[in-house]
Image: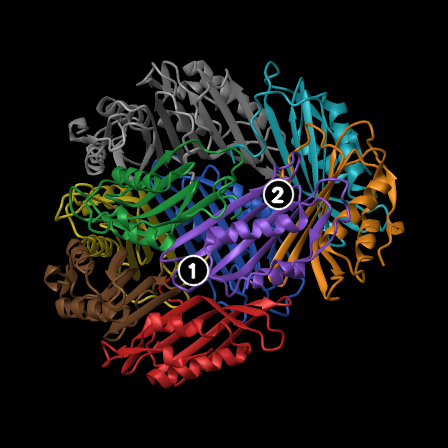
Chain colours: A red, B brown, C yellow, D blue, E purple, F orange, G cyan, I green
Amino acid sequence: MIDPDLLECFDNPAPQGAYLIEHTAEEFTSLCPRTGHPDFGTIILRYVPDRLCVELKSLKLYYQSFRDAGIFYEAVTNRIRDDLVNLMQPRWLELTTQWKGRGGIRSRITATHGTRPDNLPEPGHGR
Amino acid sequence: MIDPDLLECFDNPAPQGAYLIEHTAEEFTSLCPRTGHPDFGTIILRYVPDRLCVELKSLKLYYQSFRDAGIFYEAVTNRIRDDLVNLMQPRWLELTTQWKGRGGIRSRITATHGTRPDNLPEPGHGR
Amino acid sequence: MIDPDLLECFDNPAPQGAYLIEHTAEEFTSLCPRTGHPDFGTIILRYVPDRLCVELKSLKLYYQSFRDAGIFYEAVTNRIRDDLVNLMQPRWLELTTQWKGRGGIRSRITATHGTRPDNLPEPGHGR
Amino acid sequence: MIDPDLLECFDNPAPQGAYLIEHTAEEFTSLCPRTGHPDFGTIILRYVPDRLCVELKSLKLYYQSFRDAGIFYEAVTNRIRDDLVNLMQPRWLELTTQWKGRGGIRSRITATHGTRPDNLPEPGHGR
Amino acid sequence: MIDPDLLECFDNPAPQGAYLIEHTAEEFTSLCPRTGHPDFGTIILRYVPDRLCVELKSLKLYYQSFRDAGIFYEAVTNRIRDDLVNLMQPRWLELTTQWKGRGGIRSRITATHGTRPDNLPEPGHGR
Amino acid sequence: MIDPDLLECFDNPAPQGAYLIEHTAEEFTSLCPRTGHPDFGTIILRYVPDRLCVELKSLKLYYQSFRDAGIFYEAVTNRIRDDLVNLMQPRWLELTTQWKGRGGIRSRITATHGTRPDNLPEPGHGR
Amino acid sequence: MIDPDLLECFDNPAPQGAYLIEHTAEEFTSLCPRTGHPDFGTIILRYVPDRLCVELKSLKLYYQSFRDAGIFYEAVTNRIRDDLVNLMQPRWLELTTQWKGRGGIRSRITATHGTRPDNLPEPGHGR
Amino acid sequence: MIDPDLLECFDNPAPQGAYLIEHTAEEFTSLCPRTGHPDFGTIILRYVPDRLCVELKSLKLYYQSFRDAGIFYEAVTNRIRDDLVNLMQPRWLELTTQWKGRGGIRSRITATHGTRPDNLPEPGHGR
Amino acid sequence: MIDPDLLECFDNPAPQGAYLIEHTAEEFTSLCPRTGHPDFGTIILRYVPDRLCVELKSLKLYYQSFRDAGIFYEAVTNRIRDDLVNLMQPRWLELTTQWKGRGGIRSRITATHGTRPDNLPEPGHGR
Amino acid sequence: MIDPDLLECFDNPAPQGAYLIEHTAEEFTSLCPRTGHPDFGTIILRYVPDRLCVELKSLKLYYQSFRDAGIFYEAVTNRIRDDLVNLMQPRWLELTTQWKGRGGIRSRITATHGTRPDNLPEPGHGR
């Protein structure tokens, strides 16, 4: 089940300045707490690190730990936000979940932590 | 291994005014420091030169020197930013790395140096 | 070789107001000053004329005069900007060069002259 | 030859408020004043009428009257702008010409009259 | 675990003639038998029924029963093909699986049963 | 409920030769016979008339009569095919239904009547 | 009302060999014979002339003569086919009508005359 | 006026084998013989040369000689076909004209000369 | 260096019938044997297995073993084809390599083994 | 000037079977023999090797040797075809040149050598 202990950190290699990190996971699945049916989503994490960065393989394993959890979209979004904030204490963090839909309805949820630093590039900038 | 001594400069042919230079390298590879597996990315460099410009072939060779380095995405991004700032002392510099993904996660990191001059064209402007 | 004397002007037919002129040349070639290999680029000129406009056929011949010149991208960009500013003394001018890439790196350089007048249409507007 | 007397008006049916009119003519041809070769372009007219609107068939005939004129792109643009401003005295008018290219160079010229009213839809908006 | 007993049939409402049925399931997940990591795929079923049709909700539940199975792509493809053939004894059946990729490799497997009847519309026909 | 008596015919205005008629209805809804939830689909009818043609408004009303029917996709497809064949006795008829998906599965069913005459234009031809 | 006398011919300038003519009219309107509501369609005429060609302006006027006619799609298609065959006696002719839709149903009808000559370019060929 | 004497040839540099030449001219204009209004078209020439090839600049000047000619689409098509066949005596030639439309009708005419050699690449092949 | 011993097989789970397997690896790199510079390519493997299938993770490791090999595109293509044929003895196999380009030239090489079985779906079918 | 001695070969690493090689060079320039103005084109080479393959860097240098040659499109096409056939004696070869246009005319020329072997993948296949 959901296991934040899977998350690992490494020291921010450039702690003196603000820079933007973005990880997009397109293969996420959990279970609907009402029906038990699987949900499929995309998790977009953006953050400005302070002293720590989340290690990518551990992030993948942490996301996989939702596979058998019965949990609402809204709770997924805030749970990941909280676990990552607890782990890294970032300067700023934004967590967006996008869901392919159930019963013909597509959903997207966004939760944040902290204040967005000025002078950050726009999300999607540079694609 | 990573060798900033490969980088060469030439004198900015127009040092009196601010103008924007953008180099996009779509063929970049390094190694994951945890698993040793290869990572593949795109490196987008944008800068406003002061007295010096980086020579393009030397930039290619410098990027190639990461081929056998085991290094995190975040460290690649800040290392290139720092090496180029040390080399050129530009008025402004932005370094973005985009990674095709490992374990189903795509990543993008952006680090900057200095303050973006006003009146610069937008990124992507003119395409 | 590079010959700004090829450039010809004609009197701005509407000198009393600000309007925007854009010429995009997709067939430009020069030589790399290090390796001697040919470079291929696109030259995008945008300007607001004052008393003079550059004549289009002469602009084509001027661009063709770079065919055998060994010259960096940055110098091409600023040289064209300077030659056209000297010729026309425009109210505002922006010169962008885009290069197909050498060693897997695509480049784009933008240099300007003067301050962009307010109320000009956006670049790309009207396509 | 170029004949603004071909242009006809009719009374603006809604003179009390600002609204936007756009006419795009994709079949325009004139002659290069240097070489005599034909030029082919698109003429995009946008304006906010005051008391008068230009009649569409007369606009077509007026555009056709450039067919045998030897005239620069810049002069075409300002000539049409001026003739239509003289005819209609619009609140605001923007005239853009786009040219398929000669010698590998594509061109676009934009001239305006008056100040763009606030709250107008963006060009291209709603397509 | 994989449970073909979840599959239910209903009588083909038009058993006398050949017609084509296509079901595309974009939310499929199973586990890699080597690493235990989740795989994500799309399952495309095309068939010409004989006496029976597979009921859609039962098909969804059957696909969901692979969620905890450690199984190769090739075995998924042939297993589904076999279970559906056993269930329905269709005149013709084609089963394609598409996989988002693991280690930078995207995969697609196609298995068939029987001979494609003549005069069937092409796959993708009518879209 | 489903009411083929709503369908009306008119005499084929050109009964002596073969020609192709295609009607695409993008707004069709019925109910799932298992769950009672609404299904949404597109109905594509193609036929070569003999003595009769189906009147378009009556076809729309007939399609609307499925709104409260609990019926499988496969039965919708064959029911419409049969009702139209009974009505018109066409030389050839093809009926395709496309469904937006339920439980993450998109479906498409195609049923035909008679043999497609030679020398007919391809489906999609002329678009 | 529908008036085939509006149609005019001119002598085929190259009667000795087979060549293909295609006229696409995107602005056609007639009335529904049941409801009186306007229908909007596109008329695609393809033919291989024998001794005569239809004159384009007269074709436009003939199409305009359907404006107040209450007539089914199928009858429009065959009526135009017949009128043009009577007028020109072409070697081969194909007439397709496409209709924007009424009550959420889009339609397309195709009628032909004669046998398509071999070695003709495909429809849409050369676009 | 239309002047085939403007056309010039040069010796086919490879007369021993069949190869395909394609020239597409997107800037063609002539006049409607009924109304005097300008027509705008695209001329697509494809041919397999025998002993001679048409020189490109002379082809441009020949096309320009239609600028003041009042001539039907069908006659333009066959006239160009005939003039080029007379000039070059090619093994095979296909001439297609596409017209932007007059009175809301778009047109396309195709005329050929000779039999298409086997083993030629498809039109559009290799784009 | 290139090491076919990294390749592992598993038993074909459905050896009795022909089915199609496709693996596309977008992250491949080797070295140019002339200049030592890195090449970047995509490897597309399609095959019909007989008794054995190649295991996907071992295929990834095998591809990675080319990272330090100096080898021509043509040799990469045939080497992979040969190693996989030796390993699996498939009924049919096709190996395509696509290369991003060096010196402005993009390349693609395709080598096959055996005869393509009839009744296989088309490449790209079902996407 | 044009120098086929720049071309180098290496031994076909798989001479026993037929496979397809494709090299696309998007940066090619030569001069018009009439006007001296530069032409810009794309050169697409496809061949099935026999005993020899052309080395890619030498092909680039050979293409660059056309930079100062005044030569017709048709002669470029056949010259490259002939030089490569002389060099490699391939089983089959197809050479296509595409030209951006001069005087508003785009061109494409295709020349071949030998008979295309059966069972080769289609051009563009696998993209």
Q: In which quarter of the image is residue G56?
A: top right
Q: Which label belongs to residue D79?
A: none
- The image quadrant where one finds the N terminus of chain E is bottom right
Residue at coordinates 38% horizontally, 63% vertically from top-left?
Answer: E35
Q: Which of marks 2 and 1 is nearer the N terminus?
A: 1
Q: Relative to the observer, which residue lies in front, I90 or A97? A: I90
Marks 2/1 same chain: yes
Label 1 marks a residue whose chain is E
Q: Do the residues labelled 2 and 1 touch (CB within 8 Å)?
A: no
Which residue position holds label 2? Answer: E125
Q: Rate crowding at label 1 as few (under 14), some (14 to 19) or many (20 or more) other CA atoms within 10 Å.
A: few
Q: Which amino acid does label 1 sit on?
A: Pro
- Please state the horizontal and vertical placement of residue D89, each as a whole percent of the image: 54, 61
Residue F34 versus residue C59: which sits nearer the camera? F34
Residue I40: % across, % down: 28, 49
Judge whether residue B9 can be spotted in this image. Answer: no
Q: Which residue is drawn at 64% across and 60% down?
A: E5
Task: Please indicate whether residue I16 sits to the left or right of residue G41 in the image.
Answer: left
Q: Which of A115 and C21 is in front in this view?
A: A115
Residue at label 1? Answer: E33
Residue F93 in the figure: left or right of residue I87 = right
Q: Chain letter of disc 2?
A: E
Cα separation, mark 2 vs mark 1, equals: 36 Å
In the rendered view, would you say A62 is above or below I28? below
Q: Nearer the viewer's eye, disc 2 or disc 1?
A: 1
Q: In this view, does I50 lie to the left or right of B8?
A: right
Please report the residue visible at 56 percent of the width from the left and 69 percent of the height from the top.
A38
Q: Is mark 1 on a helix, strand or loop?
A: loop
